[in-house]
Image (tube, rainbow, N blue to C red):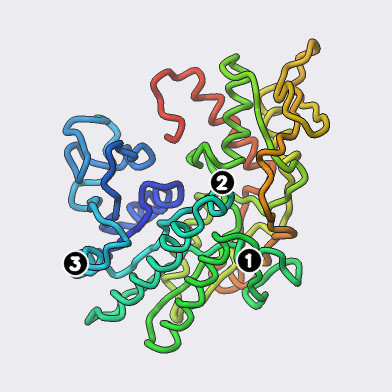
Amino acid sequence: MKTALITGITGQDGSYLTEHLLAKGYAIHGLVRRASMFNRSRIDHLRSPGDGPGRTPGSQQGTTVAPSDRLVLHYGDLADLTSVRRLLKKVSPNEVYHLAGQSHVGLSFEIPEVTCQENGMATLGLLEAMRDLDYPVRFYHAASSEMFGSPQATPQSEATAFNPVNPYGCAKAFATQLCHVYRNSYGLFACSGIAYNHESPRRGENFVTRKITLAAARIKAGRQAALHLGNLEAQRDWGYAPEYVTAMWQMLQTEKPLDCVLATGRLCSIREFAMAAFKEVGLELKFEGRGEAEVGRRTDTGAVVIRVDPRYYRPADSTHLVGDASLARQTLGWAPKTIGTDVARLMARADWATMSEPGKSQTD
């Protein structure tokens, strides 16, 4: 039985990766922060009653998938290198998946130091800790297309130069370069998955994709009146998160470590994403010029009017971020299937389903 350590296990990717590894027969240890509020909803259905920190015995009965010795959570913080070293020594993982960090691009402008600490220096601490282990361990680092920022070439591949335009992209570029250094200088099996935007019904509500699909479901149900959006013409290469975690696992099964772009190769605008999501729940969208008045109002004909809210513009926005996943296709046999507006429809359908299921978490 292989053992994996996952940082960021309670996030979108962490929960899907946990499901994938459990199905592969892994024993899994997850690193979670201690907080006054528990945030385990994405993995609660995978945990045995009474298992791990913050677990209430007997809760979520009937949803157990993993026996208590195959999924264990540990309190810790990547800023505390001593606790990380102790955990690595205690768990002795074969594979480490580093998914934790401040992952909101817009927020990185507001808290740049925290973003760089969590995404850059924390990665350095993990690499240092693994360098001192007396056995080989395989390391996956969650990199990001935001490292390319305003790229010199489209589409982007592993050979494209980094040119980040926000603190988040800068931090991820720093961490990815560190993985190169530790791979080349110390022989560490360190891979960076350069993942483009990948979404799901488990995406946090502060991300624009989930904000749109939740609004579509809530407006349809009469539970929300307004939707504030920023730049409707911003485009992203949007894929489906469960498909991307498969590639993360595949990257650590290769003979030699390598970095891979994980992308669909297609662009989709926020306008197109919103139109697909609202259409999925039976609502027509109309777009008007910039302004805050009557944002998201419903017209007499039943259409929903979306107006651009300048407050949601970023100081600088990445442009033309579309990935070339040829290397992943050739070396891993990986190819995404759910793309762009298909993701929007899937998410809107899932959020609309939760409207008729009182008490069900919208991240389940």
Other-residue count near label 1 (Cα within 10 Å), few / some / many at <14 / 14–19 / ≥20? many
Looking at the rendered image, the disc whose residue lies closer to the viewer, 3 or 1, is 1
Q: Which quadrant does the N terminus fall into? A: bottom left
Instruction: Write the residue at 61% across / 60% down.
Output: 166
Type of residue at label 3? Arg
160 vs 78, nearest the viewer: 78
Residue 26 falls in image quadrant:
bottom left
Above-or-below relation of 266 to 161: above
Above-or-below relation of 194 to 231: below
Residue that protrudes farthest toward the top in the picture: 300
Residue 361: give x, y in percent of width and height.
Answer: 41, 29
Instruction: Write the residue at 24% across / 79% down.
Output: 133
Nearer the N terminus, badge 2 or badge 1? Answer: 1
Q: Is residue 49 left or right of residue 190?
A: left
Q: CA distance from mark 2 to mark 1?
A: 21 Å
Type of residue at label 2? Glu
Looking at the rendered image, the disc whose residue lies closer to the viewer, 2 or 1, is 1
Instruction: Write the residue at 36% across / 37% down.
Output: 41
Nearer the N terminus, badge 3 or badge 2? Answer: 3
Q: CA distance from mark 3 to mark 2?
A: 33 Å
On the image, numbered disc 1 is attached to which residue? 164
Residue 226: give x, y in percent of width and height.
Answer: 65, 23
Question: Callout 3: helix, strand or loop?
Answer: helix
On the image, numbered disc 2 is attached to which residue? 199
Q: Which mark, by number, is residue 19?
A: none
Q: Is residue 145 left or right of residue 34?
A: right
Question: Callout 2: helix, strand or loop?
Answer: strand
